[in-house]
Every structure is written in C-alpha cells, then in structure tokens.
Image (cartoon, rainbow, N blue to C red):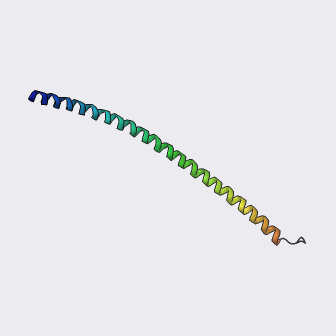
C-alpha cells in the first residue's frame, strides 16, 4: 500500500512539473502578444491625434476664411476710399 502511495505521489509530482512548465510557456507567449497589442494601440493613438490636429487646423482655417468674407461683405463701402 505504501509503495502505491509513493508511486502515485511521484506521478503527481511529475504531472505538476509538466503543467507548471506548460503554464510558464503559455504566459511567455501571452506576454509577447500583449506587448504587440500595446504597441499597435500606441501607434494608432499617435496617428489619430495627428489626424485630429490636422483636421482641427483645417477647420479653423475655413472658419477664419468665412468670417473674413462675411466681415468684408458687411463692412465694405460701396464707394472706394482714396
């Protein structure tokens, strides 16, 4: 009976070591995947912020142009000033 218990204990230890090594390898793979995803998200964030900055600048330019045109139309005199 004692031999069976020792044999089972050894088998359990071997299985435990195997599972531990498999878990370690899976953690390593997941760690690499997470780093790649973080890099992609960071790159997308930078691109979006650049596009947002450019769009905001273009919108501001259009607004200033329209405002200048409206001001010129409303406040220009029909007779040229000499």
Q: Say which residue appears at 68% left-offset and 60% top-offset.
A: 60
Tell me if residue 73 comes above or below residue 18 in the rendering. below
In the image, is 82 to the left or to the right of 26?
right
Quadrant where the image shows the N terminus: top left
Give 34 or 55, whichever is nearer the viewer.
Answer: 34
Farthest residue to the right: give it. Answer: 79
Tell me if residue 67 comes above or below residue 16 in the rendering. below
Farthest residue to the left: give it. Answer: 2
Quarter assignment of residue 18? top left
Quadrant where the image shows the C terminus: bottom right
Horizontal and vertical percent for residue 2? 9, 29
In the image, is 47 to the left or to the right of 57?
left
Q: Say which residue appears at 61% left-offset and 51% top-offset.
A: 51
Q: Say which residue appears at 71% left-offset and 62% top-offset.
A: 63
In the image, is 54 to the left or to the right of 1?
right
Tell me if residue 72 comes above or below residue 43 in the rendering. below
Give 51 or 5, whichever is nearer the viewer.
Answer: 5
Tell me if residue 8 comes above or below residue 32 in the rendering. above
Horizontal and vertical percent for residue 69? 79, 64
Horizontal and vertical percent for residue 26? 36, 35
């Amino acid at each position: 009976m004692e031999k069976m218990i020792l044999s089972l204990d050894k088998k359990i230890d071997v299985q435990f070591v195997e599972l531990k090594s498999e878990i370690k390898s899976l953690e390593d793979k997941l760690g690499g995947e997470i780093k790649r995803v973080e890099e992609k998200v960071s790159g997308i964030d930078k691109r979006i912020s650049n596009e947002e900055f450019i769009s905001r600048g273009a919108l501001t330019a259009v607004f200033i142009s329209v405002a200048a045109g409206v001001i010129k139309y409303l406040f220009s005199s029909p007779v040229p000033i000499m």
